[in-house]
């Protein structure tokens, strides 16, 4: 697990330098229970941490992980879900604070998901759902990246 986190940090640094200037990266584990919108794990994108990476697990026994996202500025979403296991299938959803689905990403088994260029308004709360679709043997956590372009 330690190796994985160090590897992730290196990837984060490479990514953040290419995509966002002066990014401070926050790497955190999910916080269960987070199985519905009301129990969403809260994250804030601001000038301290404008690039957030969360690692978590969804499976047959934990089908949904919910996160909330608030940002100090308005801009386009940069939300990625990286699946590291070839036989696992996860989907990604973005909702507004009334529970309306704004975007989803539903790629196939072993593929990563992306919700890009959805307008995020400052001060509003958005919700992100990572949903288990199929697969039996997870070996590694997924990586969920939450960021908003300035
Ligand atoms: Ca989980
Ligand atoms: Ca969960």
Image (spheres, rainbow, N blue to C red):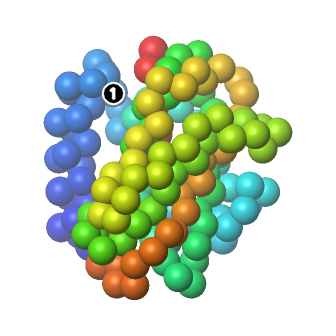
> Is residue 61 visible in this depiction of the protein?
yes
Residue 141, percent across and down?
36, 68
Number of labelled discs? Answer: 1
Eyeballing the image, is 132 above or below 126? below
What residue is shown at x 45% (from left), y 74% (from top)?
A: 134
Is 3 or 143 nearer to us in this picture?
Answer: 143
- Give the quadrant of the C terminus: top left
What residue is shown at x 53% (from left), y 32% (from top)?
A: 45
In the picture of the structure, the residue carrying the numbered disc 1 is: 23
Which quarter of the picture shows residue 120? top right
Is 51 or 109 nearer to us in this picture?
Answer: 109
- Give the quadrant of the N terminus: bottom left
What residue is shown at x 31% (from left), y 22% (from top)?
A: 20
**Left or right placement of residue 111 versus residue 14 in this view:** right
**Left or right placement of residue 11 versus residue 75 in this view:** left
Residue 96, percent across and down?
72, 36
**Left or right placement of residue 110 versus residue 136 in this view:** left
> Is residue 26 visible in this depiction of the protein?
no
Residue occupying the far right of the picture? 98
Is 101 or 97 nearer to us in this picture?
Answer: 101
Eyeballing the image, is 127 above or below 55? above
Residue 11, percent across and down?
19, 45
Is the distance from the Cβ of mark 1 to the nearest ligand 1 atom less than 8 Å? Answer: no
**Left or right placement of residue 11 versus residue 127 in this view:** left
Residue 6, percent across and down?
20, 58
Which quarter of the picture shows residue 138? bottom left
What residue is shown at x 24% (from left), y 49% (from top)?
A: 9
């Amino acid at each position: 697990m330690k190796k994985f986190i160090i590897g992730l940090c290196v990837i984060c640094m490479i990514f953040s330098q290419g995509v966002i200037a002066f990014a401070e990266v926050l790497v955190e584990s999910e916080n269960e229970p987070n199985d519905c919108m009301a129990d969403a794990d809260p994250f804030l994108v601001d000038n301290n941490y404008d690039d957030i990476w969360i690692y978590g697990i969804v499976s047959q026994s934990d089908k949904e992980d919910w996160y909330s996202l608030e940002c100090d500025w308005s801009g386009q979403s940069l939300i990625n879900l990286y699946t590291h296991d070839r036989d696992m299938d996860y989907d990604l959803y973005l909702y507004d604070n009334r529970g309306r689905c704004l975007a989803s990403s539903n790629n196939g088994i072993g593929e990563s998901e992306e919700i890009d260029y959805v307008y995020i308004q400052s001060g509003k709360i958005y919700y992100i759902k990572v949903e288990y679709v199929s697969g039996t043997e997870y070996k590694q956590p997924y990586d969920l990246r939450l960021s908003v372009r300035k």
